């Protein structure tokens, strides 16, 4: 082929690539001896199918069920896929996992279908979370993502899950689990409603405003608690669903959200009302179960390293998400620990020999 013809073919390929990227009706076009393929726009085809996982001989036949709750959102679907894969890959009893997903989309926009396509054997249950239930209770925070209704779905877990779910492990979508999740899910709650890693050296006061700390009646809520100024991250929690319902904890969290609307007493979305209700009242578990903050700070999302000590769960809380940084070719070193669980297919047009 002459150099002029090569140039014409190159231009034709460039134009077709643009056309294929602009619309989804065409999935492929032939140019000379080459075929340009555009992956399907269907969510179910955007992710690879995961390997099948089966229970080991030590798994209980009847009473070994583990209930895991997560939210289901198009912006975080890639993270959700990685989280599910990591859980199944590292537990001895993958068939004993039951996944409960809360979504604000009435038809879930194919999100559940995508999960089922990647995990055909997954015990997956989807629940509609009505965003109007919480929208008027939300106050602006430092990041827009924290103000989305689905970020508050964890407050309503006990009201949403069926009666046969008595204990649930809630996980954010930006985690990967590198240990057997059963060790966390089966933690002795010792009569508490929640269990989570607890951090007592953080700047606890920074979560609340001067208006809160200057109001004796409001900040008095922390007086008399066992460890009143210990922070915990709500992205990894084990919840006694029965005790939550019996204690009316949804209403208690909502009451603090109502105070926030009137006085602005805290920052950072759904975390502070949990702290107001539960700080000093949770069952503390080992820090290995939430290596959080890997997404960097909430303003600039700068890279952060791992905390010292053993690791069972990695959590990219903060502004930076590993899939976005990897795609932008500006990853942090910890993002390479997330990459092996990524099921996302390469989405650019692929040129193949025909």
Image (spheres, rainbow, N blue to C red):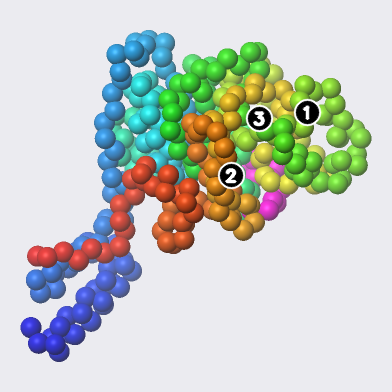
- Tell me if residue 333 comes above or below residue 53 in the rendering: below
In this view, the residue farthest toward the bottom is 4
Q: How many marks?
A: 3
Given residues 261 and 94, the one toward you in this image is: 94
At 63% from the left edge and 13% from the top edge, which residue is drawn?
Answer: 190
Q: Mark 3 and mark 1: span between their CA atoms? A: 11 Å
Q: Mark 3 and mark 2: span between their CA atoms? A: 14 Å
Give the residue at mark 3. Answer: 198
Is residue 43 at all visible to an observer of this figure? no
Could you say where residue 261 lies in the image, as x and y percent from the top left? 77, 45
Could you say where residue 139 lies in the image, as x and y percent from the top left? 71, 48
Could you say where residue 46 lies in the image, as x and y percent from the top left? 31, 50
Secondary structure at badge 1 equals: loop
Could you say where residue 108 lies in the image, as x and y percent from the top left? 43, 43
Residue 117 included in the magenta stretch of the image: no
Give the residue at mark 1. Answer: 228
Q: Quadrant of the N terminus?
A: bottom left
Give the residue at mark 2. Answer: 293
Asked if labels 1 and 3 touch by Cβ distance under 8 angstroms, the answer is: no
Secondary structure at badge 3 equals: strand
Highlighted range, magenta? 130-143
């Amino acid at each position: 082929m002459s150099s002029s013809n090569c140039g014409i073919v190159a231009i034709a390929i460039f134009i077709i690539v643009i056309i294929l990227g602009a619309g989804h009706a065409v999935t492929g076009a032939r140019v000379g001896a080459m075929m340009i393929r555009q992956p399907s726009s269907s969510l179910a085809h955007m992710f690879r199918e995961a390997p099948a996982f089966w229970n080991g001989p030590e798994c209980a036949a009847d009473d070994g069920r583990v209930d895991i709750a997560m939210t289901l959102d198009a912006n975080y679907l890639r993270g959700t896929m990685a989280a599910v894969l990591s859980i199944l890959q590292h537990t001895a009893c993958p068939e004993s996992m039951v996944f409960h997903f809360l979504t604000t989309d009435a038809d879930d926009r194919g999100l559940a279908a995508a999960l089922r396509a990647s995990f055909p054997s997954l015990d997956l249950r989807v629940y509609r979370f009505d965003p109007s239930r919480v929208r008027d209770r939300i106050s602006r925070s430092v990041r827009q993502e924290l103000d989305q209704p689905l970020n508050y779905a964890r407050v309503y877990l006990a009201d949403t899950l069926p009666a046969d779910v008595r204990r649930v492990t809630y996980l954010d979508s930006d985690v990967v689990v590198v240990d057997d999740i059963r060790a966390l899910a089966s933690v002795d709650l010792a009569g508490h409603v929640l269990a989570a890693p607890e951090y007592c050296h953080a700047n606890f006061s920074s979560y609340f405003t001067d208006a809160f700390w200057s109001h004796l009646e409001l900040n008095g809520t922390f007086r008399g608690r066992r460890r009143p100024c210990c922070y915990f991250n709500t992205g990894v929690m084990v919840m006694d669903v029965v005790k939550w319902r019996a204690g009316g904890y949804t209403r208690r969290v909502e009451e603090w959200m109502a105070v926030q609307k009137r006085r602005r007493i805290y920052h950072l979305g759904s975390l502070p009302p949990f702290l107001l209700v539960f700080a000093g009242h949770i069952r503390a578990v080992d820090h290995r179960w939430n290596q959080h903050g890997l997404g960097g700070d909430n303003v600039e999302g700068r890279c952060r390293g791992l905390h010292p000590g053993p690791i069972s769960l990695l959590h990219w809380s903060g502004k930076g998400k590993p899939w976005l940084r990897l795609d932008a070719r500006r990853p942090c070193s910890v993002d390479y620990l997330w990459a092996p669980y990524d099921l996302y297919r390469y989405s650019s047009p692929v040129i193949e020999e025909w």
